[in-house]
Image (cartoon, helix red, strand yellow):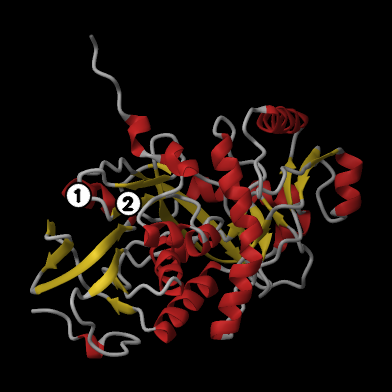
Amino acid sequence: MRPNPEKAVGCPGKASGMDYDVIVIGGGLVGVSIAWGLSRCGQRVAIIDEGDLASRAARANFGLVWSSSKGLGNAPYSRWSRTSTANWHRLAAELKAETGIDTGFVQSGGFSIRLTPTELERGVASMTKLASQPGMEADGTPPLEYEILDQAETRRRLPLVGETVAGAIFSPLDGHANPLRLFAAFHKALQQRGVHYLPHKKTTAIRHRAGAFELTGDEWRLTSGKIVLAAGIGNTALAPLVGLNVPLSPSRGQIIVTERLKPFLSHATGYLRQTDEGSVLIGESKEATIDHQRPRGPITAVLAERAVRTFPLLRDVKAVRTWAAFRVVTPDGYPIYEQSERFPGAFAFACHSGVTLAANHALVLPRQISAGELCADLSVFHSRRFRVPAAA
């Protein structure tokens, strides 16, 4: 039995011919940003999603819009990230105009705070190597900008930092946003645009017949001209159905949330930021694990200790909650963007920087999907990079 399109969210009426131009599998941040962009391109779009009980990185996200330190060893990823941070102004403005929801995007620059001289030396070495690698600049890509700040200059710009902070690396490219409001804005905009959001549905089979993709699940079937796999870790099972390989694994991260405070930090930092509502988010951990999503006490203690060393005023502040969630990561940490060679029109996308890259996923990628071809600049993110040649 097919879902009743008249009961789907924002449905303008039943489509003729194929049910949709594009079906996006996965209603997390990657999926909804792409779906919104496809609707801007005039595509008839549906989102197939497991619903609110799905394991989403989007609702446990730190909210950084960060590009300055990304791409060491992969210049195209640095360019892609910097382009997305630049596109964020347009994304935030369009979503607010459509929905009235302020995503909380602020691009006042970001500080990578270093607590010890050794940390600062390593950070400087990393940024120097990043900036000097070939392929960092391209037409239309914002240049990489950053400053190395010693202890005195760091304290001048951030008077409340701890006395033992060794220094910082500052970039005007970086910022932050509210991921929950971003998620809500996309969903409201999708509803207003007539995109069908179909929750509580798990795709169990995908077939390609007569130029169309047929998706089926428990008592439902839908057809479309193209499909986008944006189901996070679920892509590992879905991708082989359309001749793709998407190797992914979960990485657990933790966040501490404090009580609301008077504004004291208008900039993002790599592991601590104050939201526009006053709470402070603290998080930096990464664990390769699949056992559970519960916060671990030892990691919480380390996060808290580093936060207090960075801003001593946090010493007596109440932590109101902690949480943990799984990020989706590839073997090398970089995204996967690809179209199936066996079944053109089937795309698979996966990344762990869904907030930073949301602007490109919403404003750049959908045009390429609609045209049926990903640009050459994205070829470096194809999963063929993980194929190991057979021994002779």
Q: Amino acid at mark 2?
A: Ala
Question: Is residue 322 something one can see in this rendering?
Answer: yes
Label 1 Cα neighbours within 10 Å, binned few <14 / some 14-19 / many ≥20: many
Q: Position of residue 270 (x, y in %)?
A: 65, 49
Which sits in the foreground, 256 or 326?
Answer: 326
**Residue name at image x 38 percent, y 62 percent:** 370
Q: Residue at x 62, y 33 (%)?
A: 135
* Residue 244 location (% of width, % of height): 25, 44
Residue marked by disc 2: 348
Of all residues, the one furthest to the top in this rendering is 392
Task: Using the rendered view, name the quadrant where residue 225 is placed.
Answer: bottom left
Q: Which residue is mark 1?
A: 242
Say which residue appears at 46% left-offset and 47% top-offset.
375
| The C terminus, quarter of image | top left
- Mark 1 in CB contact with mark 2 (< 8 angstroms): yes
Position above or below: 233 against 16: above
Please give left or right for residue 371 compared with residue 220 in the image: right
Q: Is residue 379 left or right of residue 133?
A: left
Q: Is residue 21 above or below residue 160?
A: below
Tell me: 273 left or right of 16: right
Does 131 appear above or below 277?
above
Above or below, 194 relative to 181: below
N-term-proximal mark, 1 vs 2: 1
Q: Nearer the viewer, residue 364 or 361?
A: 364
Q: Residue 121: give x, y in percent of width and height.
A: 75, 28
Q: Residue 76: where, in percent of width, then height?
A: 55, 39
